[in-house]
Image (cartoon, rainbow, N blue to C red):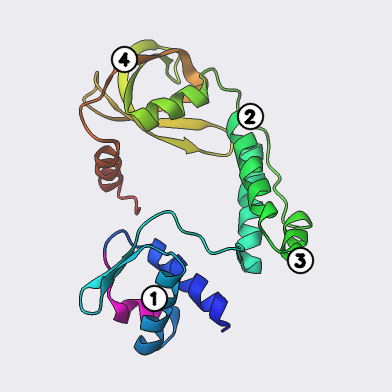
């Protein structure tokens, strides 16, 4: 493995950990000796990578560092293209445009030959268009990010209409529908709301009292869904 590729692999491995990880674990995951690992960490630190820690205590990478030029494997490029094309077909126009913009930014910093691979990828996405949304998905995502309560007028599968105050913490994208995952104040439990069945929606001024990450973890545990 070339040294530049080895350093990039180490960076990518460190990014997977939010807490300090031992040198032995890093050496095993990157396929190098512990001595080589320590040299590689020193090299990255000399290039400006905010890697904190020391032998015996573990290492953690602080955000904000990227090795120029950006390098990707062939599989990683295909994953990016496929993901971007999937978002373009399944998401709302604003998010689809953001995916295309992100891919364009990545293309700008890729070497020429890798940029060609990005532009000529043969992985295609074919699916039926999703059901039209009645709710503003951009407003839903903003409510999730800011942990704001949403007031919904909602029509269920049988056509019965109810008014709910919910704490939205996730938005699930299926092939044909989008679903808000939220804590429902009326039911005092987690509920799922299809965005095409929302008759009216208004974000409220107040933040809900529990953190989004806590709600997400609790919901996953309840549904037995792995992170």
In the rendered image, which quarter is residue 213 located in?
top left
Q: Main secondary structure of the magenta part?
A: helix
Residue 208 sits inside the magenta stretch:
no
Q: Are marks 1 and 3 in contact (CB under 8 Å)?
A: no
**Marker disc for residue 93:** 2
Q: Secondary structure at mark 3?
A: helix
For the point 41% across and 87% down, the residue is 36
Q: Nearer the viewer, mark 3 or mark 2?
A: 3
**Marker disc for residue 41:** 1
Q: Nearer the viewer, residue 211 or 106?
A: 106
Confirm whether residue 148 shows in the render.
yes
**Marker disc for residue 205:** 4
Residue 21 sits inside the magenta stretch:
yes
Q: CA distance from mark 1 to mark 2?
A: 42 Å
| Picture coordinates of residue 20, whole percent (x, y) | 26, 66
Q: Are marks 3 and 2 in contact (CB under 8 Å)?
A: no
- Dot 1 or dot 3, earlier in sequence: 1
Confirm whether residue 92 shows in the render.
no
Which residue matches tag 3? 113
| Picture coordinates of residue 90, whole percent (x, y) | 61, 37
| Picture coordinates of residue 131, whole percent (x, y) | 60, 27
């Amino acid at each position: 493995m070339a040294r530049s590729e080895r350093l990039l692999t180490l960076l990518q491995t460190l990014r997977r950990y939010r807490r300090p990880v031992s040198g032995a674990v890093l050496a095993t995951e990157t396929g190098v000796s512990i001595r080589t690992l320590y040299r590689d960490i020193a090299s990255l630190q000399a290039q400006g990578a905010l890697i904190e820690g020391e032998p015996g205590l573990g290492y953690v990478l602080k955000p904000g560092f990227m090795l120029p030029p950006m390098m990707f494997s062939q599989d990683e490029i295909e994953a990016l293209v496929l993901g971007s094309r999937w978002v373009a077909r399944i998401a709302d126009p604003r998010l689809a445009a953001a995916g295309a913009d992100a891919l364009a930014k990545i293309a700008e910093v890729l070497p020429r030959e890798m940029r060609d691979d990005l532009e000529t990828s043969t992985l295609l996405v074919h699916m039926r268009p999703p059901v039209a949304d009645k709710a503003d998905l951009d407003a839903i995502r903003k409510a999730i990010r800011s942990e704001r309560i949403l007031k919904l007028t909602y029509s269920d599968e049988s056509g019965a209409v109810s008014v709910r105050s919910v704490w939205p913490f996730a938005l699930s994208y299926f092939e044909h529908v989008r679903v808000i995952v939220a804590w429902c104040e009326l039911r005092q439990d987690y509920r799922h709301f299809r965005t095409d069945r929302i008759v009216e929606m208004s974000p409220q001024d107040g933040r809900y009292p529990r953190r989004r990450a806590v709600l997400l973890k609790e919901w996953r545990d309840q549904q037995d869904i792995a992170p």
